[in-house]
Amino acid sequence: MVSSPTLRVDGLDLMAGLVLEDDRRWGEAAERFQWEDAQAVLDPNAVPYHFLTRARGGSKTTDLAGAAIAMLLTLPDRSRLHWLAADREQGALAVDAIAGFASRTPMLRGALEVSNWQVRFGPTGSSLDVMAADAPGAWGLRTWGVFVDEIAQWATTAGPRRLWEAVSTAVAKNPHARMVVLTTAGDPAHWSHRILEHAKTDPLWRVHEVPGPAPWMDEERLDEQRRRLLESSYRRLFLNEWTASEDRLTTVDDLHACVTLDGPIPPRPGQKYVVGVDLGLKSDRTVAAVCHQEGEQIILDRMKTWAGTGQQPVRLEEVELWLLQAHRSYNRAFVVMDPWQGVGIAQSLRRQHVRVREFTFSSQSVGRLASALHLLLRDRNLALPDDPALLEELANVQLRETSPGVYRMDHDPDKHDDRAIALALASHELLSYPRRVWRAY
């Protein structure tokens, strides 16, 4: 039992001595990749940030718990550590893992005070706070270390991102603080993948991605998982590969290949433009996309987004004024929108001599929109700016087969497809409008 606040032991030696559920010590059971990660994470002279990925069953929570204990017992008095989990259930697993080590390891018995969401080392007053990604933000924290569990499984809503931003930036305030991200690979459209891409190029980060199933996984059980799961799910969970779902509108590679613009493009004399509009008042956004065509390529010249809430819906008069100005600036561009959504705006714009084309949404017409946008992205015939919000939305839009060969665009409940719809409306119109009408127009 640790009984003195002045006792300092080597963190790696301490972690190696932790007792696992099968009564082996961690150091006896650990594979080489586990030793490498533990040594790097617990070395105060190594880089401060670590992004580690392992397949499902790869001892992620157990190893993070061991590293957290080792750090907790070797830091200065009254230090604070923080553990971020995907949700409260995942956070509870972290507390259970730490409590298990504390009860099984002789030198820790009675040294750690474990409550629902905190672990405290009494002799030094240092503590580890466990926080769920679906909890409120945590600005103002002072921390000596952050452990991030399964970030690729975190929700894509604003709350988890704010928590990540708050706690990860808190690490920068302490020159001695460290941060460890340990997760199974996810969908490359998830926002955590951008953190990984940054980590691969930044000198203050260490990245270690362990390929394939964990070496102790049973082959027959792996085969059963392979037979039951979608290929993308199996590759993410058990091969630890960042893989897009089969129902995605596009791949990350195709999407990135379409990013060829520096920003909005000013109007060009003689060029024909279309403005696609997707109207949403409260829960959805209103988006307008100005596009033109060059050969087989569709160019997104400009995009405007209005976000409404239940208390403050989008002001349609602002949308109408913007569309009128876009019509005049972009060579009398005409507008395409859903007549049911925008009947009032359409009538007002027509009175002001703006040409408005109605696109009626049906299962067949929505399928044409989805197909047009999918093919443009697949063939890399779409020119887009480096707009993170737009690219994330396009990466997460799904294709749902509503009937044989007929698809529509869809999204998860915590995501949107408003930008994609507006872009698809303008693109479809440019691709399908008769050339003789363009000449007459």
Image: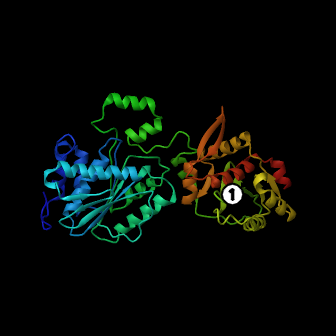
Of residue 202 and residue 322, the one placed in the foreground of this image is: 322
Q: Is residue 68 above or below residue 124?
A: above
Locate residue 24, reporting x and y percent.
17, 42
Image point (34%, 27%), residue name: 220
Q: How many marks?
A: 1
Name the residue: 67% across, 53% down: 423
- The quadrant in which residue 211 appears is top left
Residue 255 visible here: yes
Q: Quick one: 431 or 269, which is closer to the camera? A: 431
Depth check, front residue: 346 or 395: 346
Looking at the image, is 400 positioned above or below residue 228?
below
The C terminus - image quarter:
bottom right
According to the image, label 1 marks what residue?
280
- The quarter of the displayed image where residue 218 is located: top left
Q: Which residue is located at x 48 percent, y 51 percent?
A: 190
Quick check: can you spot residue 150? no
Q: Residues within 10 Å of mark 1 (few under 14, many from 20)?
A: many
Amino acid marked by disc 1: Gly
Query: In the image, residue 28 lies at what x, y percent?
Result: 16, 43
